[in-house]
Amino acid sequence: MSAVTASLCSTLLFVGLFVFVSADPETITAEPGQNVTLTCQAPNNNITVVKWSRADLGEQCVLLYRDEQLDPEHQHPSFKNRVDLQDREMKNGNVSLILNNVTTADNGTYECHVQKYGDSLKLISNITLSVVDPPGQTAGDTGKKSGGLIVGLIVFVFVVIAVVIVVVVNCRERK
Ligand SMILES: *[C@@H]1O[C@H](CO)[C@@H](O)[C@H](O)[C@H]1NC(C)=O
Ligand SMILES: *[C@@H]1O[C@H](CO)[C@@H](O)[C@H](O)[C@H]1NC(C)=O
Ligand SMILES: *[C@@H]1O[C@H](CO)[C@@H](O)[C@H](O)[C@H]1NC(C)=O
Ligand SMILES: *[C@@H]1O[C@H](CO)[C@@H](O)[C@H](O)[C@H]1NC(C)=O
Ligand SMILES: *[C@@H]1O[C@H](CO)[C@@H](O)[C@H](O)[C@H]1NC(C)=O
Ligand SMILES: *[C@@H]1O[C@H](CO)[C@@H](O)[C@H](O)[C@H]1NC(C)=O
Protein backbone atom coordinates (compact mmCIF):
# COMPACT_ATOMS: atom_id res chain seq x y z
CA MET A 1 0.00 0.00 0.00
CA SER A 2 1.48 3.35 -0.99
CA ALA A 3 1.58 6.27 1.42
CA VAL A 4 -1.10 8.02 -0.64
CA THR A 5 -3.51 5.05 -0.48
CA ALA A 6 -2.75 4.64 3.22
CA SER A 7 -3.60 8.24 4.03
CA LEU A 8 -6.66 8.09 1.77
CA CYS A 9 -7.79 4.98 3.63
CA SER A 10 -7.36 6.52 7.07
CA THR A 11 -9.20 9.64 5.89
CA LEU A 12 -12.08 7.50 4.64
CA LEU A 13 -12.02 5.52 7.89
CA PHE A 14 -12.15 8.76 9.89
CA VAL A 15 -15.03 10.13 7.80
CA GLY A 16 -16.76 6.75 8.08
CA LEU A 17 -16.36 6.75 11.86
CA PHE A 18 -17.68 10.28 12.06
CA VAL A 19 -20.77 9.39 10.00
CA PHE A 20 -21.21 6.26 12.12
CA VAL A 21 -21.04 8.16 15.41
CA SER A 22 -23.33 10.95 14.30
CA ALA A 23 -25.86 8.56 12.68
CA ASP A 24 -29.33 9.28 14.03
CA PRO A 25 -30.81 5.89 15.00
CA GLU A 26 -28.90 3.83 17.51
CA THR A 27 -26.28 1.72 15.77
CA ILE A 28 -24.53 -1.37 16.97
CA THR A 29 -21.64 -3.01 15.19
CA ALA A 30 -20.76 -6.68 15.19
CA GLU A 31 -18.52 -9.12 13.39
CA PRO A 32 -19.88 -12.13 11.47
CA GLY A 33 -20.57 -15.06 13.80
CA GLN A 34 -21.33 -12.96 16.84
CA ASN A 35 -24.60 -12.92 18.76
CA VAL A 36 -26.13 -9.50 19.19
CA THR A 37 -28.91 -8.00 21.28
CA LEU A 38 -31.07 -5.33 19.70
CA THR A 39 -32.58 -3.45 22.61
CA CYS A 40 -36.11 -2.13 22.67
CA GLN A 41 -37.91 -0.81 25.69
CA ALA A 42 -41.70 -0.60 25.46
CA PRO A 43 -44.04 0.97 28.00
CA ASN A 44 -44.64 -1.66 30.63
CA ASN A 45 -48.18 -2.82 30.24
CA ASN A 46 -50.06 -5.65 28.64
CA ILE A 47 -47.99 -6.32 25.58
CA THR A 48 -49.92 -8.58 23.22
CA VAL A 49 -47.89 -8.33 20.02
CA VAL A 50 -44.20 -7.73 19.36
CA LYS A 51 -43.04 -7.32 15.79
CA TRP A 52 -39.43 -6.85 14.79
CA SER A 53 -39.08 -6.01 11.11
CA ARG A 54 -36.68 -4.56 8.58
CA ALA A 55 -38.02 -2.30 5.85
CA ASP A 56 -36.21 -4.18 3.05
CA LEU A 57 -37.82 -7.53 3.96
CA GLY A 58 -41.29 -6.42 2.89
CA GLU A 59 -44.13 -8.39 4.43
CA GLN A 60 -41.90 -10.87 6.23
CA CYS A 61 -40.59 -10.07 9.67
CA VAL A 62 -37.55 -10.76 11.73
CA LEU A 63 -39.64 -11.93 14.68
CA LEU A 64 -43.36 -11.91 15.37
CA TYR A 65 -44.78 -12.66 18.79
CA ARG A 66 -48.52 -12.90 19.18
CA ASP A 67 -51.12 -15.11 20.86
CA GLU A 68 -48.50 -15.70 23.54
CA GLN A 69 -46.08 -17.41 21.17
CA LEU A 70 -43.61 -16.84 18.38
CA ASP A 71 -45.20 -16.99 14.94
CA PRO A 72 -42.75 -18.55 12.46
CA GLU A 73 -45.15 -18.30 9.53
CA HIS A 74 -44.53 -14.64 8.78
CA GLN A 75 -40.84 -14.83 9.51
CA HIS A 76 -38.20 -14.28 6.86
CA PRO A 77 -36.41 -17.64 6.32
CA SER A 78 -32.98 -16.20 7.05
CA PHE A 79 -33.99 -15.60 10.69
CA LYS A 80 -35.38 -19.07 11.39
CA ASN A 81 -33.87 -20.49 14.58
CA ARG A 82 -31.61 -17.47 14.99
CA VAL A 83 -33.82 -15.05 16.87
CA ASP A 84 -35.55 -14.91 20.22
CA LEU A 85 -36.83 -12.40 22.69
CA GLN A 86 -34.35 -11.63 25.43
CA ASP A 87 -37.15 -12.21 27.90
CA ARG A 88 -40.20 -14.16 26.73
CA GLU A 89 -42.17 -12.74 29.65
CA MET A 90 -41.23 -9.22 28.54
CA LYS A 91 -40.82 -8.08 32.12
CA ASN A 92 -40.79 -4.30 32.45
CA GLY A 93 -41.63 -4.00 28.75
CA ASN A 94 -38.27 -5.39 27.73
CA VAL A 95 -38.80 -6.66 24.18
CA SER A 96 -35.11 -6.75 23.21
CA LEU A 97 -34.24 -9.15 20.41
CA ILE A 98 -31.42 -11.66 20.40
CA LEU A 99 -29.97 -12.41 16.98
CA ASN A 100 -27.49 -15.27 16.85
CA ASN A 101 -24.62 -15.85 14.45
CA VAL A 102 -24.91 -12.62 12.48
CA THR A 103 -23.73 -12.33 8.89
CA THR A 104 -23.09 -9.29 6.71
CA ALA A 105 -26.54 -9.93 5.20
CA ASP A 106 -28.05 -8.97 8.57
CA ASN A 107 -27.01 -5.37 8.53
CA GLY A 108 -29.75 -2.84 8.17
CA THR A 109 -32.23 -0.92 10.26
CA TYR A 110 -34.47 -2.97 12.53
CA GLU A 111 -37.83 -1.61 13.66
CA CYS A 112 -39.39 -2.57 16.95
CA HIS A 113 -43.20 -2.48 17.07
CA VAL A 114 -45.35 -3.26 20.06
CA GLN A 115 -49.08 -3.60 20.44
CA LYS A 116 -50.67 -3.14 23.81
CA TYR A 117 -53.92 -4.75 24.82
CA GLY A 118 -56.77 -2.85 23.19
CA ASP A 119 -54.43 -0.68 21.15
CA SER A 120 -52.89 -0.74 17.67
CA LEU A 121 -49.39 -1.80 16.66
CA LYS A 122 -46.99 1.10 17.28
CA LEU A 123 -43.38 1.75 16.28
CA ILE A 124 -41.28 2.04 19.43
CA SER A 125 -37.77 2.49 18.07
CA ASN A 126 -35.32 1.76 15.30
CA ILE A 127 -31.91 0.25 15.75
CA THR A 128 -29.29 -0.14 13.05
CA LEU A 129 -27.10 -3.20 12.92
CA SER A 130 -23.84 -2.95 11.04
CA VAL A 131 -22.06 -6.26 10.48
CA VAL A 132 -18.55 -5.75 9.21
CA ASP A 133 -15.73 -8.17 8.63
CA PRO A 134 -13.03 -7.91 11.31
CA PRO A 135 -10.16 -5.50 10.56
CA GLY A 136 -7.88 -8.58 10.67
CA GLN A 137 -8.61 -8.82 6.90
CA THR A 138 -5.58 -6.59 6.24
CA ALA A 139 -3.41 -9.24 7.95
CA GLY A 140 -3.62 -11.09 4.61
CA ASP A 141 -1.73 -8.19 3.04
CA THR A 142 1.05 -8.40 5.59
CA GLY A 143 1.20 -12.16 5.06
CA LYS A 144 1.60 -11.70 1.31
CA LYS A 145 4.27 -9.06 1.86
CA SER A 146 6.40 -11.25 4.16
CA GLY A 147 5.78 -14.15 1.76
CA GLY A 148 7.17 -11.97 -1.07
CA LEU A 149 10.12 -11.06 1.10
CA ILE A 150 10.98 -14.72 1.70
CA VAL A 151 10.73 -15.54 -2.03
CA GLY A 152 12.92 -12.49 -2.79
CA LEU A 153 15.48 -13.63 -0.23
CA ILE A 154 15.62 -17.17 -1.69
CA VAL A 155 16.02 -15.79 -5.23
CA PHE A 156 18.78 -13.45 -3.98
CA VAL A 157 20.65 -16.35 -2.33
CA PHE A 158 20.42 -18.42 -5.55
CA VAL A 159 21.67 -15.50 -7.66
CA VAL A 160 24.64 -15.01 -5.30
CA ILE A 161 25.48 -18.72 -5.47
CA ALA A 162 25.21 -18.66 -9.29
CA VAL A 163 27.48 -15.63 -9.51
CA VAL A 164 30.03 -17.25 -7.18
CA ILE A 165 29.99 -20.46 -9.29
CA VAL A 166 30.42 -18.52 -12.54
CA VAL A 167 33.30 -16.50 -11.08
CA VAL A 168 34.99 -19.60 -9.66
CA VAL A 169 34.63 -21.51 -12.97
CA ASN A 170 35.94 -18.51 -14.96
CA CYS A 171 38.97 -18.18 -12.68
CA ARG A 172 39.83 -21.89 -13.02
CA GLU A 173 39.63 -21.75 -16.84
CA ARG A 174 42.01 -18.77 -16.89
CA LYS A 175 44.64 -20.65 -14.87
C1 LIG B 1 -24.37 -17.58 20.41
O1 LIG B 1 -25.49 -18.16 21.06
C2 LIG B 1 -25.55 -19.57 20.90
C3 LIG B 1 -26.87 -20.06 21.46
O2 LIG B 1 -27.23 -19.38 22.62
C4 LIG B 1 -24.35 -20.18 21.63
O3 LIG B 1 -24.37 -21.57 21.50
C5 LIG B 1 -23.08 -19.62 21.00
O4 LIG B 1 -21.97 -20.10 21.71
C6 LIG B 1 -23.08 -18.11 21.00
N1 LIG B 1 -21.96 -17.65 20.18
C7 LIG B 1 -21.16 -16.66 20.57
C8 LIG B 1 -20.09 -16.28 19.61
O5 LIG B 1 -21.32 -16.09 21.64
C1 LIG C 1 -54.35 -6.11 30.70
O1 LIG C 1 -55.05 -7.05 29.92
C2 LIG C 1 -56.11 -7.72 30.60
C3 LIG C 1 -56.69 -8.73 29.64
O2 LIG C 1 -55.71 -9.49 29.04
C4 LIG C 1 -57.13 -6.70 31.05
O3 LIG C 1 -58.13 -7.34 31.78
C5 LIG C 1 -56.45 -5.64 31.93
O4 LIG C 1 -57.36 -4.64 32.26
C6 LIG C 1 -55.27 -5.01 31.21
N1 LIG C 1 -54.56 -4.09 32.06
C7 LIG C 1 -54.11 -2.91 31.65
C8 LIG C 1 -53.35 -2.10 32.67
O5 LIG C 1 -54.30 -2.49 30.54
C1 LIG D 1 -33.68 -5.35 28.88
O1 LIG D 1 -32.75 -6.08 28.13
C2 LIG D 1 -31.53 -5.42 27.92
C3 LIG D 1 -30.68 -6.22 27.00
O2 LIG D 1 -29.98 -7.22 27.65
C4 LIG D 1 -30.86 -5.25 29.26
O3 LIG D 1 -29.64 -4.57 29.07
C5 LIG D 1 -31.77 -4.44 30.16
O4 LIG D 1 -31.20 -4.37 31.43
C6 LIG D 1 -33.14 -5.05 30.24
N1 LIG D 1 -34.02 -4.14 30.91
C7 LIG D 1 -34.84 -4.50 31.90
C8 LIG D 1 -35.68 -3.43 32.47
O5 LIG D 1 -34.90 -5.65 32.31
C1 LIG E 1 -23.21 -19.49 11.54
O1 LIG E 1 -23.53 -19.18 10.20
C2 LIG E 1 -22.64 -19.74 9.25
C3 LIG E 1 -23.01 -19.29 7.87
O2 LIG E 1 -23.99 -18.32 7.87
C4 LIG E 1 -22.68 -21.25 9.36
O3 LIG E 1 -21.75 -21.80 8.45
C5 LIG E 1 -22.33 -21.67 10.76
O4 LIG E 1 -22.48 -23.07 10.89
C6 LIG E 1 -23.24 -20.99 11.77
N1 LIG E 1 -22.80 -21.29 13.12
C7 LIG E 1 -23.64 -21.70 14.06
C8 LIG E 1 -23.03 -21.93 15.40
O5 LIG E 1 -24.85 -21.87 13.85
C1 LIG F 1 -24.17 -3.01 5.18
O1 LIG F 1 -22.81 -3.39 5.03
C2 LIG F 1 -22.13 -2.74 3.98
C3 LIG F 1 -20.76 -3.32 3.88
O2 LIG F 1 -20.11 -3.35 5.12
C4 LIG F 1 -22.11 -1.25 4.24
O3 LIG F 1 -21.47 -0.59 3.20
C5 LIG F 1 -23.54 -0.75 4.38
O4 LIG F 1 -23.55 0.62 4.68
C6 LIG F 1 -24.28 -1.52 5.43
N1 LIG F 1 -25.66 -1.11 5.44
C7 LIG F 1 -26.29 -0.74 6.54
C8 LIG F 1 -27.73 -0.34 6.38
O5 LIG F 1 -25.74 -0.71 7.62
C1 LIG G 1 -37.77 4.22 11.83
O1 LIG G 1 -37.64 3.91 10.46
C2 LIG G 1 -38.79 4.16 9.69
C3 LIG G 1 -38.56 3.69 8.28
O2 LIG G 1 -37.62 2.69 8.22
C4 LIG G 1 -39.10 5.63 9.70
O3 LIG G 1 -40.28 5.85 8.98
C5 LIG G 1 -39.26 6.09 11.13
O4 LIG G 1 -39.41 7.48 11.16
C6 LIG G 1 -38.07 5.70 11.98
N1 LIG G 1 -38.39 6.03 13.36
C7 LIG G 1 -37.49 6.46 14.24
C8 LIG G 1 -37.98 6.68 15.62
O5 LIG G 1 -36.33 6.68 13.93
Image (tube, rainbow, N blue to C red):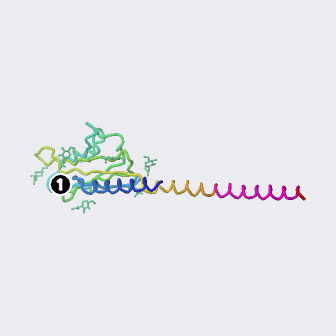
Q: Is residue 76 above or below residue 44?
A: above
Q: Position of residue 51 (x, y in %)?
A: 23, 45
Q: Position of residue 155 (x, y in %)?
A: 68, 54
**Mark 1 Cβ inside 8 Å of ligand 3:** no
Left or right of residue 121, residue 32 in this image: right
- Is 172 within the magenta? yes
Q: Out of 8 and 174, give the one closest to the viewer.
A: 174
Q: Quadrant of residue 58?
A: top left
Q: Quadrant of residue 175?
A: bottom right
Q: Out of 172 and 82, give the one closest to the viewer.
A: 172
Residue shown at 15% from the left, 52% from the top: 46
Residue stretch rendered in magenta on the structure? 152-173
What's the residue type where badge 1 is placed?
Ala
Q: Residue furthest right?
A: 175
Q: Out of 138 and 98, give the one closest to the viewer.
A: 138
Q: Quadrant of ligand 3?
A: bottom left
- Is 8 within the magenta? no
Assign a secondary structure to mark 1.
loop
Residue shown at 33% from the left, 51% from the top: 130
Q: Is residue 118 above or below residue 37?
A: above
User: Circle 1 is placed at which residue position?
Assistant: 42
Q: Position of residue 127 (x, y in %)?
A: 25, 51
Determine the main secondary structure of the stretch shown in magenta: helix
Left or right of residue 44, residue 171 in this image: right
- Total label count? 1
Q: Residue furthest top?
A: 59
Residue shown at 33% from the left, 47% from the top: 107
Q: Residues within 10 Å of mark 1 (few under 14, many from 20)?
A: many
Q: Position of residue 38 (x, y in %)?
A: 28, 54
